[in-house]
Amino acid sequence: MYILAIESSCDDTSAAVLRDGILLSNVTASQAVHEEYGGVVPELASRAHQQNIVPVVDAAIKRAGITKEDLNAIAFTRGPGLMGSLLVGVSFAKGMARSLGIPMIDVNHLHGHVLAHFIRESEEDNDQPKFPYLCLLVSGGNSQIVKVNSYKDMEILGQTIDDAAGEAIDKCSKVMGLGYPGGPIIDKLARQGNPDAYQFAKPNIQGYDYSFSGLKTSFLYNLRDWIKDDPDFIEHHKEDLAASLEKTIVDILMKKLRKAVKDTGIKQVAVAGGVSANNGLRNAFRDHAKRYGWKIFIPKFSYTTDNAAMIGITGYFKYLDGDFASIDLPAYARIQTSQCSNTNQPMLNYKPANSQ
Ligand code: KG4
């Protein structure tokens, strides 16, 4: 059984093909056009999706060694995301499914990130989490601790009350005059810096919720003071600044996660989303596994940022449940409870990193 999956929620056009839940191909076209604007420009994103979607889907089908007539279903990201971007993928999936006379499966982008740990590249690839597990979902638009009870039953234990972790990293990188997106740049610089060089504000809020806006402000104000004394402060200290910023963010994320593990007694802990590519965070996970006996799940780098493989595996589980989408299903930019009839609690709103 072959599923074609399409992801176009933000600024990556991606297509994947799975055979019986095993990934055969995953092709992604990223959009460099946003770099000069320091954030994703929605109008440019939709235009680029429009240009990329046919070649990306063609390449995914070809790499899988099949033809489009072999497909049994098409899974697509319905939302949340940028409406103009989503419409390209949703409309393409509808047209293609119609023309081939096969069913469609709508996928929640955030469920895709959380279930990325079930992507299998071969029959032997069997290291998947068992339910229930905890997932730290950290991206440009989300910072959540999710309790995953099953493929379709997910509970948000905590979430950011303001900015997401990725957003904070990107904004701090922007005030330092580094490029976009800031995450990979900060990650690289941090490897050469001293993580204890500077202290930035950490939030003090109840429960499992996160907050990153105070850290962002503290970073900005400190920087402003230091630049007064030394106009080249950033250039002289960018490695230490990046390392200290990264450490602060990782500490904030891990503290609440430790609390969630302690309170729920669930020691299977996964990390997902764009920020899960961060080496400091990945090392903190490995360290916690050793120190506290967690069984951890860290995605391959290619499955941290937006990709169709995660949409495909989520679509596969829905296919097995016979959970198909009707042709008149609209895309959604933000999620409503009524649009998640098969989840106990919806995954929350999505705000793409630095969208203008
Ligand atoms: O999940 P994702 O690809 O998409 C959206 O949120 O739309 O996440 C993107 C975020 C950006 O904030 C980016 O800076 C961050 O993930 N990111 C990283 C790294 N790679 C990407 N943050 C820290 N370290 C990285 N290596």
Image (cartoon, grey):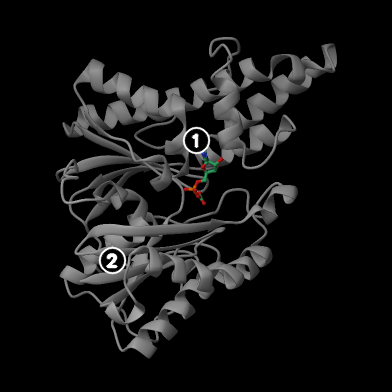
Residue at x-position 42% and y-position 45%: 302
State the separation of the CA atoms marked 2 and 1. Answer: 32 Å
Within-10-Å neighbours for mark 2: few <14, some 14–19, many 20+: many
Percent across and percent down for residue 297 are: 27, 36
Q: Nearer the viewer, residue 281 or 163?
A: 281
Q: Is residue 54 left or right of residue 107?
A: right
Amino acid at circle 2: Gly
What residue is pinned by disc 1? 211
Determine which quarter of the picture holds residue 314: bottom left
Q: Earlier in the sequence, mark 2 or mark 1?
A: 1
Dot 2 beta carbon under 8 Å from ligand 1? no
Q: Residue 23 is drawn in which quadrant?
A: bottom left
Q: Residues within 10 Å of mark 1 (few under 14, many from 20)?
A: many
Query: Relative to residue 43, is residue 29 depicted above or below?
Result: above
Q: Which amino acid is tagged 1? A: Ser
Q: Is residue 252 visible?
A: no
Q: Secondary structure at mark 1?
A: loop
Q: Is residue 198 above or below residue 51?
A: above
Q: Position of residue 279 (x, y in %)?
A: 45, 27
- What SS does tag 2 mark? helix
User: Who's the residue at 44% across and 85% down the image?
Assistant: 95
